[in-house]
Image (tube, helix red, strand yellow):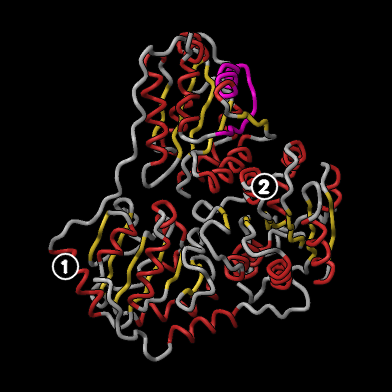
Amino acid sequence: MTRAADILAARLYRAGCRYAFGMAGGEVLTLIDALEKVGIQVITVKHENTGGFIAEGVWHRSQAPAIVLATIGPGAMNAVNVVVNALQDRVPMVVLTGAIDPDEGQTYTHQILDQTQVFRPITKASFVLEPKVADVIADKAVTIAMEPRQGPVHIDVPISAADAPGPSAVVPDRSLATPVVPAEGADLTRARQMVAEAKRPIIVAGLDILTDGSATDLQAFAERIGAPVVTSYKAKGVLPEDHPLCLGGAGLSPLADKHLMPLFHAADLIICAGYDPIEMRTGWRNIWDTSRVNVIDISADQNHHYMHHASLNFVADTGATLRLLTDGSGVDARWPDGQVGHAKAALQAAFPIDDDWGPAAAIDVCRQVLPKGTLATADSGAHRILLSQMWRCDAPRELVQSSAFCTMGCAVPLAMGLALAAPDRTVVSFSGDGGFLMVAGELATAAELDLRPILVVFVDSSLALIELKQRQRQLANNAVDLHHHDFAAIGQAFGGVGYTVRSRDALAQALVEAQNAETFSVIAVEIDRQAYDGRI
């Protein structure tokens, strides 16, 4: 007999899924059995939230939907944070939760709540598995999760439904729609004219370029029209960051904005290439005026954010649209006064690397010692803003972070997922001490899986970004200080290698040793309190 759970598992396997992350419970035993039988390894994590981030890390390398597995009640609720993160950060994720049978729930209330009602507003869709249409529900889940803009889909799986016979004839897998190409017409003609006549064009590029794989088209277009490119943090690397037209990532650093905003104010054409402003701080709200400047917005979905407005809107594939906006010929020099080069130099000067010691010095050492192509992750906090400006990406997805939901505790599990999916690459995570402590228990999973990421922890015994905001508002110091802990010892206690460093040389030596270690490494980078002042 082919169970409904078997049909669900088989569809996930055909989508490329090879791992599921979660914790077992009586309500998901059939699901676990079905996933394992079809070839999807179920990995036991220490918390469903971190399990979801490990799953996301795998997705960034495999491009198969992430799978989170949670049992009824507390298990399912533990996953809420990572599911919201997947919605806002556009991560395709299938969330499988166990449930008791509906008739049982009429007279039994222990651990019972309406899980579909919980997940419906934080997912693209929420289903209850019904055996006779298990194939349809499974296919809907995969395709909805993968369709632009990507995101999480939830399936509640009652015990009897998982065990019940599925349909004898399974519907064919539905293929994703062909990317949309703008139609010839007045809007496209006008857009081409805007591009042809622009003297100071600028591009702000976002994560849709990752989804439709149009980084090559972006670079060719930028070079053809001589337009500098600013990316969101999620899109870092879609244009190699040593390229003369690349101005790096933006969205959270007022110090970086100081040098980027004048370019947008001086531009006569702004092209939003797959730009999703969910990553940007409020300072990026309505930074241009469409009565004064032409704005072309190319997005994967209708924008309802009102963070900015545009002269023309195309809901289409980014690369296909960019290819249509020029005739392929070269152009006269744009930005002839050297303003782009000056801005690029000013940005580099704004984030100096010559400190004897501190967070910037530590980031600089990591850049120098770790090999080109290292995969990095960043947690939320002051270090992330500094790192996102200083860390150079030569390709997309070389720096992964929660850049829309901005949740703490994501860097370590994201790095674990990257290490699992790309064992031949060096992987490093950057956390503050607060974020690291949130997920320290998952180091046990890293040891169990023989993963070898390098886990850098900035230790200043403070929630540094919040403490900085507290001082800026001239409030008393409350609820932002942390105790000083021995993070190297924590790493060693879970089976890793631990280092505590207070200098460039000590950090460099620890990084060399960590790259040759047979297990994960925790490097506690001890810095002074308030070390980020004036740096972000």
Residue 248 covered by magenta stretch: no
x, y percentage for residue 116? 44, 27
Query: Viewer-proximal residue, 313 or 323?
Result: 323
x, y percentage for residue 151? 44, 42
- For image coordinates 31% across by 60% down, the residue present is 298
Badge 1: residue crowd in 10 Å (few <14, some 14–19, many ≥20):
few
Q: Is residue 373 left or right of residue 205?
A: right
Q: Is residue 6 left or right of residue 143?
A: right
Asked if residue 307 is positioned above or below residue 364 in the image, the reply reads above
Residue 29 covered by magenta stretch: yes
Q: Is residue 188 left or right of residue 502?
A: left
Asked if residue 430 is positioned above or below residue 445 in the image, the reply reads below
Quadrant in which the C terminus appears = bottom right
- Residue 382, visible in the rendered structure: no
Contact? badges 2 and 1 (CB < 8 Å) = no
- For image coordinates 34% across by 22% down, the residue present is 171
Badge 2: residue crowd in 10 Å (few <14, some 14–19, many ≥20):
few
Three-letter code for the amino acid on which mark 2 is drawn: Pro
Residue 48's tag is none
Mark closer to the observer (2, 1): 2
The residue range painted magenta reads 18-36
Query: Viewer-proximal residue, 357 or 143?
Result: 143
Q: CA distance from mark 2 to mark 1?
A: 48 Å
Asked if residue 360 is positioned above or below residue 217 in the image, the reply reads below
x, y percentage for residue 201? 33, 77
x, y percentage for residue 94? 48, 34
Q: In which image quadrant can residue 315 be found? A: bottom left
Three-letter code for the amino acid on which mark 1 is drawn: Thr
At mark 1, the secondary structure is: helix
What residue would you read off at disc 2? 423
Residue 189's tag is 1
Label 2 or label 1, whichever comes before in sequence order: 1
